[in-house]
Amino acid sequence: MFEYQLHELRHAELVRRAENEWLARHARRTRRTVRRSAANASEERASGSRSRRGQEK
């Protein structure tokens, strides 16, 4: 019985670790996506303003 309880505790700990690692990877991916989309949005605004200035000349 004691061995089974140790097995259950170990299993629960491994599941918690796996969930935490998944959550950390997911958070990193989300932050990276947000940074990239923000950078792309600022590039589009900058390139849009440059092209308009070029047409005025």
Image (cartoon, rainbow, N blue to C red):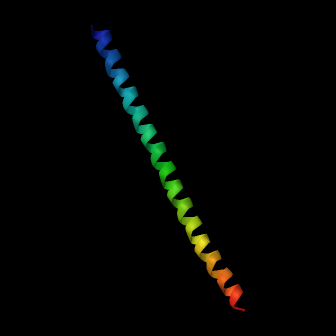
- Of 47 and 27, the residue lying toward us: 47
Q: As displayed, is residue 45 above or below residue 18? A: below
Residue ID at (32%, 21%): 9
Q: Quadrant of the C terminus?
A: bottom right
Residue name at image x 53 percent, y 54 percent: 32
* Residue at image coords 37%, 32%: 16
Q: Quadrant of residue 10?
A: top left
Give the x, y percent position of residue 36.
56, 60
Q: Residue furthest left?
A: 1
Position of residue 56 measured from the top left corner of the image (x, y, whole percent): 68, 90
- The image shows residue 41 at horizontal and vertical percentages of 56, 68
In the figure, is residue 7 to the left or right of 27? left
In terms of depth relative to the viewer, which is nearer, 34 or 12? 34
- Give the residue displayed 32% in from the left and 16% down from the top: 6
Asked whether, in this view, residue 50 is left or right of residue 45, the answer is right
Note whether 44 is above or below 54 in the view shown. above
Residue that sits furthest to the top in the current view? 1
Residue farthest toward the bottom in the current orientation of the protein: 57
Quadrant of the image containing the N terminus: top left
Judged left or right of residue 24, residue 44 is right
Q: Is residue 35 above or below residue 15?
A: below
Residue 2 as seen in the image, left or right of residue 42: left
> From the viewer's perspective, is residue 56 above or below residue 24?
below
Where residue 3 appears, as percent x and y from the top left, is 32, 10
In-front residue for pair 34/25: 34
Total numbered badges shown on the rendered structure: 0
